[in-house]
């Protein structure tokens, strides 16, 4: 877990630096991962509008930091990107595999970011969400398009969580 956290933190930091300045900084032991990430052709089709953006819900005392928000250069869609770093394996045939995150959890996470974005930037509209799985052999993406459903899923989960907290701390 510590290795994955160190890897994720470092790669997120290099991506943030690259999107903001054009330079990744010290790639350290993750240069294979980072070079594949910044050379991924997707970045040529989008323009970043927010990187590592901190958001808060002052009513419920909830905060989060989204990875990247971009606008697609041709479709003008606003896309919320979440970067996940994974350690992949290659089989004898050269096929790459890695563990993916639970789709329901990803949808709730996206819903949380969307909810926070709409609270802090009510004029903004998120058209779709993208998970970018970064691993030592390359990049794999997965698109999620039902943004209002994800927001509802998050709000439902938040409501259940807050109800449970009120039972523990009734104030």
Image: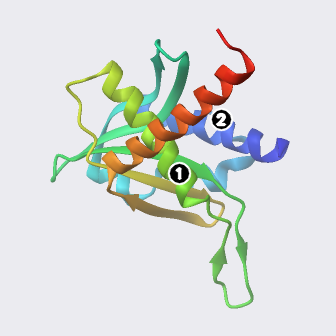
Dot 2: what SS?
A: loop
The answer to which image quadrant residue 117 occupies is top left
Residue 49 in picture, x, y percent from top left: 31, 31
Q: Nearer the viewer, residue 115 or 171?
A: 171
Q: Is residue 32 above or below residue 88?
A: above
Q: How is the image coloured?
A: rainbow
Looking at the picture, how far across and down is residue 131, in whole percent? 48, 54
Q: Residue under circle 1?
A: 106
Nearer-N-terminus badge (2/1): 2
Q: Is 159 located above or below residue 168 in the figure?
A: below
Left/right of residue 47 with respect to residue 50 in the rendered view: left
Would you call the spot at circle 2 few (<14 residues within 10 Å), some (14-19), or many (20 or more)? Answer: few
- Please say whether residue 1 is visible from this viewpoint: yes
Which quadrant of the figure contains the C terminus? top right
Residue displayed at 76% across by 47% down: 4
Residue tagged 2: 26
127 and 4: which one is in front?
A: 127
- Between circles 2 and 1, the one closer to the viewer is 1
């Amino acid at each position: 877990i510590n290795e994955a956290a160190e890897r994720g933190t470092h790669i997120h930091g290099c991506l943030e630096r690259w999107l903001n300045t054009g330079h990744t900084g010290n790639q350290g032991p993750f240069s294979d991962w980072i070079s594949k990430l910044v050379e991924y052709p997707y970045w040529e089709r989008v323009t970043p509008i927010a990187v590592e953006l901190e958001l808060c819900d002052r009513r419920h005392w909830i905060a989060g930091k989204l990875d990247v928000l971009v606008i697609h250069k041709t479709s003008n869609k606003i896309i919320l990107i979440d970067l996940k770093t994974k350690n992949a394996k290659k089989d004898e045939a050269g096929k790459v595999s890695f563990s993916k995150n639970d789709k329901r959890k990803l949808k709730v996470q996206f819903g949380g970011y969307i909810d926070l974005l709409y609270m802090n930037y009510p004029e903004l509209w998120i058209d779709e969400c993208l998970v970018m799985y970064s691993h030592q052999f390359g990049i794999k993406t997965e698109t999620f398009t039902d943004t209002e459903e994800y927001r509802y899923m998050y709000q439902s989960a938040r409501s259940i969580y807050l109800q449970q907290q009120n039972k523990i701390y009734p104030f």
